[in-house]
Image (tube, rainbow, N blue to C red):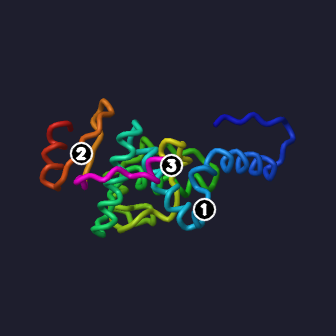
Amino acid sequence: DTYRFPQGVTGDQIIAIMRENFEAKTGKFLDGLSVAEQTRILTVASLLEKEVRSARDMRLVAGVIENRLKRDMPLQLDAAVAYGACRKLFIQGAYCAVSQVNLVDNIRKDSAYNIYMRKGLPPGPITNPGLQAIAAALHPEPSPYYYYLSDRAGVTHFSRTGTEHIQTRRLYF
């Protein structure tokens, strides 16, 4: 959402307004869930928000995430690695272009957000997810897929095996 605040508004007031709006919009999705469950859903939703575009792809990728978690496989999602590379700058209030992060270098650097090196979800959300992503995280689409990639046109291609995934990568990159 876009917020317009008058001059003189305090940080606490901004937080209260944003929290109230968030709770009003997500309450129907998250009511009744524990804080840990809400954090898990919002973390998955934040990954979906950055990884794929359409509601259908979000549901399928949510299913891929669930499949990989059940098999104790690293999630290997670029968006989390890019966020981890920029996180220190974000905390300092500085700008970091997540889309410009050198993933090849950062995949080799250990961090809590490097889910190439670590199994499981990152420690928390990497962005503010939209309602479509939250709904997808709550209702992942079951599938036989363990891999996916988005081509340069934004089309998402799904694979069942690592071998299929490598072949798909060769086709589109």
Q: Say whether residue 16 is left or right of residue 100.
A: right
- Please name whichever residue, 152 or 139, is drawn nearer the observer in this view of the structure: 139
Q: Say whether residue 132 is left or right of residue 107.
A: right
**How many residues crowd around disc 3 within 10 Å: few (fewer than 14), some, or many (20 or more)?**
many
Which residue is drawn at the image coordinates 17% and 43% (left, top)?
A: 168
**Percent of width and height locating residue 136:** 44, 48
Q: Which residue is mark 2?
A: 158
| Dot 1 amino acid type | Gly
**How many residues crowd around disc 2 within 10 Å: few (fewer than 14), some, or many (20 or more)?**
many
| Dot 3 amino acid type | Ile
- Residue 30, quarter of picture: bottom right
Task: Give the CA distance from mark 1 to mark 2.
Answer: 33 Å
Task: Give the CA distance from mark 3 to mark 1.
Answer: 15 Å
> Which residues make up the magenta segment?
135-146
Q: Which residue is mark 1?
A: 32
Q: Quadrant of the C terminus?
A: top left
| Dot 2 amino acid type | Phe
Label 2, secondary structure: give it. Answer: strand
- Please name whichever residue, 58 or 111, is drawn nearer the observer in this view of the structure: 58
Q: Which residue is mark 3?
A: 134
Q: Nearer the viewer's eye, disc 3 or disc 1? A: 1
**Percent of width and height locating residue 9:** 84, 43
Q: Quadrant of the N terminus?
A: top right
